[in-house]
């Protein structure tokens, strides 16, 4: 039914050979759309398709500029190309995009469009009109440039271990060592390297908070929180739902986290469990070593996905053929991982920082889930139809983490290692929840108190950390590291408020996994059918198609935590 034989969209409005170079070459296409006379429903729908084609071309160009820059933050020409787009092209697009939105919503033939087909699309257009302010254009351009500075700063972070230089991601491998002194030594080196940039990162964050607050006030919002909720299209839940989620994590997840860490402490035979012990195994048990090279990671991931469902493997295979993968950690590369959809050509790009650890397998299958989503949504008629909510996008990735566990034998040669890998994954599913709640709660405070000082911010961060602290890990003497731990979370800098989606979606993913345990093929059918809808349905409707209910109440969280706890006991 679904195919990875993805086709670049045929151009019918712009010339086949056209590439984005400057505003002068791009402007006539926007003017054409703005000035065009539309007399029939058919002409209106063609106008929407032409606008979609233009959006896809511009979007893909911007994506490639960002991809190339994150792959090599030290090459000035790549940073300049990205900066040129956000300062010289994007600001000129904004007022014309707003004018096109208004042309659509005030057009007399609007009510002739299929109400169901265009409901979410038109809702999004209305939202864009409500948020648009001419005076925010230069601010948003500045923010786009500033946000990318985080990757530039982080990409330079390295440490020296045993006379050899490592990126922080590569150095994290030493935290799996049997030598506890070595683990502690490297842990301190990583943390101290991060602390070196505390001042520069705090100053960067202060600028971001100030400009984001100004952006919200310009648009007549009380604060950036309310503005960003609207901008992110959070139509189906409120700030109060987020607060309830935070409380539910404390009530229903932290007890499980304590059990996981207590078990780890006993397994290692330690009097006290320290942060550098979390990834270690008892002496005599080798760290999991799922792959050596990034090429091996790709090939094993393709094999794993193919066993799960051939279509999934074909998606990764297609990306490999197109060189749409950059997986290995190296100096000068931005931190983190992402899947970047490419609106015109279709096959997305996966970026990550692999260093040969179990965590890298999880990241690869996570981003692979996003990639499958990109493939499934690509055939939709309009670019706007493919703009799906993040709360379903992260179900795509997190459910794939859980589905794929059945085929992780691809990465591990023994049953014992496979069992350990599954345990690692389920522990991660649980232990990530407090961090999600911490980051989300912190952001709510940040933007509701935008005039705070650095000292007040640190104090609030420590207070929230303490709220969600487990009872097992001993953090004594590490207060300075803990106080600055938020600086490692790139979402705070690059995509504000985008974090609770991981929590909401993790619950959805666990629900998908419950289905998968009962009927594999039906669960994967539901998964594909929901993702193929892109953003053409509301969030509750997308969840319903996936066989889920859109519910992250404390009661629902308890049911799902009980299920994962039981699955862990079975292992």
Image: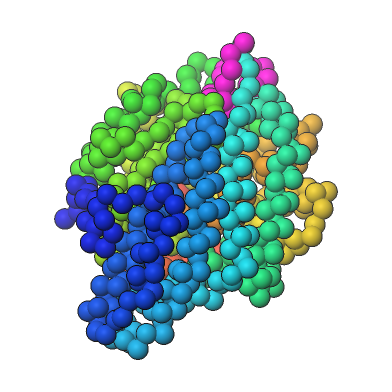
Q: Tally the marks.
A: 0
Asked whether 295 falls inside the magenta stretch, the response is: no
Residue 515 seen by the camera? no
Q: Nearer the viewer, residue 29 or 275?
A: 29
Q: For residue 425, which quarter of the picture?
A: top left
Q: Residue at x 34, y 84 (%)?
A: 110
Q: Residue furthest top?
A: 163
Q: For residue 142, which quarter of the picture?
A: bottom right
Is residue 225 rendered to the left or right of residue 286? right
Is residue 472 rendered to the left or right of residue 335? right
Q: Which quadrant of the figure contains the C terminus?
A: top left
Residue 171 seen by the camera? yes
The picture places residue 483, in percent across and down from the top left corner, at 75, 42
Q: Nearer the viewer, residue 438 or 347?
A: 347
Asked whether 166 falls inside the magenta stretch, the response is: yes
Q: Residue at x 46, y 69 (%)?
A: 96
Q: Residue furthest left?
A: 1
The picture places residue 83, in percent across and down from the top left corner, at 54, 46
* Whether residue 352 is situated above or below residue 540 in the rendered picture: above
Region of the chain picked out in magenta, as a range: 163-186
Q: Residue furthest front?
A: 24
The picture places residue 535, in percent across and down from the top left corner, at 36, 65
Q: Which quadrant of the figure contains the N terminus?
A: bottom left
* Whether residue 114 is situated above or below residue 518 in the rendered picture: below
Q: Nearer the viewer, residue 455 or 197?
A: 197
Q: For residue 183, which quarter of the picture?
A: top right
Q: Residue at x 51, y 35 (%)?
A: 77
* Whether residue 409 is situated above or below residue 161 in the rendered picture: below
Colouring mode (rainbow / by chain / secondary structure / one colour): rainbow
Q: Which secondary structure type mostly characterizes the magenta part of the structure?
A: helix
Q: Residue at x 61, y 65 (%)?
A: 136
The picture places residue 444, in percent across and down from the top left corner, at 67, 61
């Amino acid at each position: 039914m679904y195919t990875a034989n993805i086709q670049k969209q045929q151009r019918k409005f712009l010339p086949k050979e056209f590439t984005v170079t400057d505003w002068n070459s791009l402007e006539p296409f926007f003017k054409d759309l703005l000035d065009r006379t539309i007399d029939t429903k058919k002409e209106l729908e063609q106008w929407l398709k032409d606008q979609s084609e233009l959006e896809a071309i511009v979007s893909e160009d911007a994506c490639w500029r960002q991809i190339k820059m994150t792959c090599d933050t030290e090459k000035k020409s790549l940073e300049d190309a990205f900066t040129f787009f956000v300062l010289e092209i994007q600001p000129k697009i904004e007022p014309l995009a707003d004018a096109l939105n208004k042309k659509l919503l005030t057009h007399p033939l609007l009510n002739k469009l299929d109400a169901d087909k265009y409901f979410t699309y038109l809702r999004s257009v209305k939202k864009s009109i409500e948020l648009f302010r001419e005076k925010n254009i230069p601010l948003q351009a500045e923010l786009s440039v500033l946000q990318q500075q985080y990757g530039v700063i982080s990409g330079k972070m390295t440490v020296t271990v045993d006379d050899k230089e490592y990126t922080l991601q590569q150095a994290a491998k030493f935290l799996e060592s049997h030598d506890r002194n070595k683990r502690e030594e490297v842990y301190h080196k990583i943390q101290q390297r991060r602390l070196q940039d505390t001042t520069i990162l705090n100053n960067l964050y202060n600028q971001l908070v100030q400009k984001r607050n100004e952006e919200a006030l310009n648009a007549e919002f009380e604060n950036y929180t309310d503005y960003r909720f609207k901008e992110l299209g959070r139509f189906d839940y409120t700030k109060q739902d987020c607060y309830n989620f935070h409380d539910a994590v404390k009530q229903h997840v932290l007890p499980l986290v304590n059990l996981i860490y207590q078990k780890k402490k006993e397994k290692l035979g330690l009097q006290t469990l320290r942060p550098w012990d979390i990834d270690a195994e008892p002496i005599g048990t080798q760290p999991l070593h799922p792959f050596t090279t990034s090429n091996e990671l790709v090939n094993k991931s393709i094999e794993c996905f193919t066993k799960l469902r051939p279509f999934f493997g074909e998606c990764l295979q297609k990306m490999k053929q197109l060189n749409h993968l950059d997986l290995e950690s190296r100096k000068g590369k931005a931190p983190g991982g992402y899947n970047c959809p490419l609106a015109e050509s279709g096959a997305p790009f996966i970026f990550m920082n692999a260093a040969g650890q179990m965590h890298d397998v999880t990241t690869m299958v996570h981003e692979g889930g996003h990639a499958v989503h990109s493939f499934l949504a690509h055939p939709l008629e309009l670019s706007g139809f493919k703009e799906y909510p993040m709360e379903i996008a992260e179900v795509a990735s997190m459910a794939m983490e859980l589905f794929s566990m059945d085929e992780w034998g691809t990465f591990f040669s023994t049953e014992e290692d496979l069992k350990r890998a599954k345990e690692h994954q389920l522990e991660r599913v649980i232990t990530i929840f407090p961090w999600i709640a911490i980051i989300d709660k912190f952001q709510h405070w940040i933007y509701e108190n935008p005039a705070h000082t650095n000292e007040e911010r640190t104090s609030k961060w420590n207070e929230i950390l303490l709220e969600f602290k487990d009872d097992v890990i001993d953090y004594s003497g590490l207060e300075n590291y803990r106080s600055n731990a938020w600086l490692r979370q790139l979402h705070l800098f690059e995509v504000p408020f985008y974090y609770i989606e991981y929590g909401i979606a993790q619950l959805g993913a666990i629900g998908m996994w419950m289905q998968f345990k009962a009927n594999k093929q039906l669960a994967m059918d539901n998964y594909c059918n929901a993702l193929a809808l892109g953003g053409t349905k509301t969030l509750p409707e997308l969840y319903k198609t996936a066989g889920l209910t859109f519910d992250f109440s404390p009661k629902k969280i308890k049911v799902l935590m009980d299920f994962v706890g039981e699955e862990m006991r079975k292992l």
